[in-house]
Image: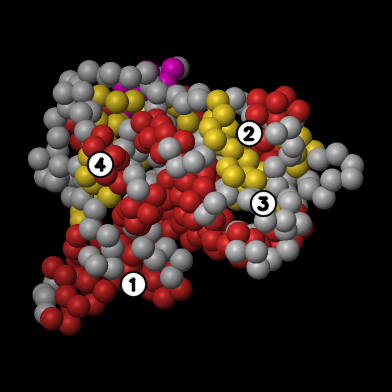
Amino acid sequence: MIADAPLRVAIVGAGPSGSALAILLARRGVDVTLFDDDRRPDLLVGESLVPAVIPILQELGIEQETASFSRVKPGVSFIWSPTDRYRFTFARFAPAVFPYAYNIPRPRFDNALAAHAATSGVTRVVARARLELAGNGSDAELALAPETITAAPSLGGRQPDLIVDATGRARLSARVLGIPADVGSRRDVAHFAHFAGFRWDEDEPEGQVLIARGETGWIWCIPLKDRLSVGIVLSQEDATRLGRSPEERLKHAIVTDPWLKSIAADAPRVTPVATFSNYQLISRRGYGPGWVAVGDAFGFVDPMLSPGVFLSLRSAELVAEALTPVLQHRAPASPAARAALFHPYIAAHRAALSAWMSLVAMFYDGRMLALMHAGHGWMLNGSGHLKHAIQDHIERHIALQATGAATTARYSRTLLRILGRYGLRGVEPTQMAIH
């Protein structure tokens, strides 16, 4: 890096984390090249946002556009049985929780972010970038392949000062460097599609995301602006029993689950059925001399509570913050010195991923719904100001975690752990577990 020259950053991948980081860095005077392979499927997991993402959308200057093609999400309802239904609206917990979020068509959202990056001074290169080990004599670990350098004239035939891996689950940097990952215990599969002409559950507000426990696995219903996203998440073995193809499995789930049948049995499917593997992963290393990983390229969690886009955008914010000393010429500019700046980012993001995984586990093993059930029963057996205050306090801290407002907060996490062990009032978690 030449003295007083702008930092030159190549971001590989134009999903939410890559495009958001490109915008944030370009605003700070960084020379950003964003590689976008422009290959987005018709459907992507991550169609529902958590409220904590709204301030980030506002910071990026993209909330208004997002609102134009999305549906406002007022909250989430958990439907665990014909008699166990628990509704949360975000506005109830304001101002600690942002009072709304959005349900988004992901490809359009991703395209809007990438387009916004291009108008923010970012050089967008439509090409599939390739990474390789840096050659001998380089201070960096990773390099852009020669054909990738050639595809980006803005790089002037030289390697960038920093490579950002924003390739999502492809995890290009980890693959090239042979970096292992810690993988969660579940190996589920998700089949989902969009439907038109559905009958909305009259017990729920418009836009409310519905999460239901199925006979096996769980079901989502995410209302978009003009259609409904319906998905099933279950083990590979259970999926096989539903049918041979994703289409057969999703159709079978819709017509055999009474609640889902009432919503979508007569609704025409208007997209192909998409299939995604559903598991949790955190890379054991997310940065090194000359490179850093953001978003899903570093780690991802189960989609049940919809944290994916938030975690991706938040990782972009953290990386931009980590580079502040370099951009203000207060830190050495060597690849190794820059790499050391990313340690706090990795620690914070690893903690967030772990906290979300722990929270999701409480839904899978039944502790969270058992806690809700116990609290509901407690309130039915007489009420009073103290009871209401205690129950509101507990539900507020559930909301603080599940909305992203304070997922890593020590008090909230400790409270739920203690209640999940000692506050179930005779309710057996295994009876509320997802199988």
Query: Would residue 398 be found to the left or right of residue 307 on screen?
Result: left
Label 4 residue SS? helix
Give the crowd class for mark 3: few <14, some 14-19, many >=20 residues within 10 Å.
Answer: few
Residue 45 visible to an observer of this rendering = no
As helix, strand or loop, the secondary structure at mark 1 comes to loop
> Mark 4 packing: few (<14 Cα in 10 Å), some, or many (20+)?
some
Q: Please tell me which of labels 4 and 2 falls first in the chain.
A: 4
- Asked if the residue under mark 1 is in contact with the one under mark 3, i.e. CB atoms within 8 Å, the reply is no
Quadrant for the C terminus in the image: top left
Could you give the CA–CA distance between mark 1 and mark 4, rounded to whole angstroms?
A: 40 Å
Q: Amino acid at mark 4?
A: Ala
Is residue 336 among what the camera can see?
yes
Near-viewer residue (97 or 426): 97
Q: Where residue 423 is drawn, which disc sits there?
A: 1
Q: Which of the two labelled residues, at mark 1 and mark 4, occupies the earlier sequence position?
A: 4
Q: Residue at x 59, y 45 (%)?
A: 31
Q: Which numbered disc covers residue 5?
A: 3
Residue 120 x, y percent position in the rendering: 45, 42
Give, as a three-letter code, the residue at label 3.
Answer: Ala
Q: Is residue 229 above or below residue 85?
A: above
What span is in magenta?
A: 245-253
Q: Camera-side residue: 422 or 131?
A: 131
| Circle nearer the N terminus (1, 2) | 2
Task: Name the dominant secondary structure of the magenta segment.
Answer: helix
**Can you give x and y, in whole percent of width and height, for residue 362 in the image?**
41, 57
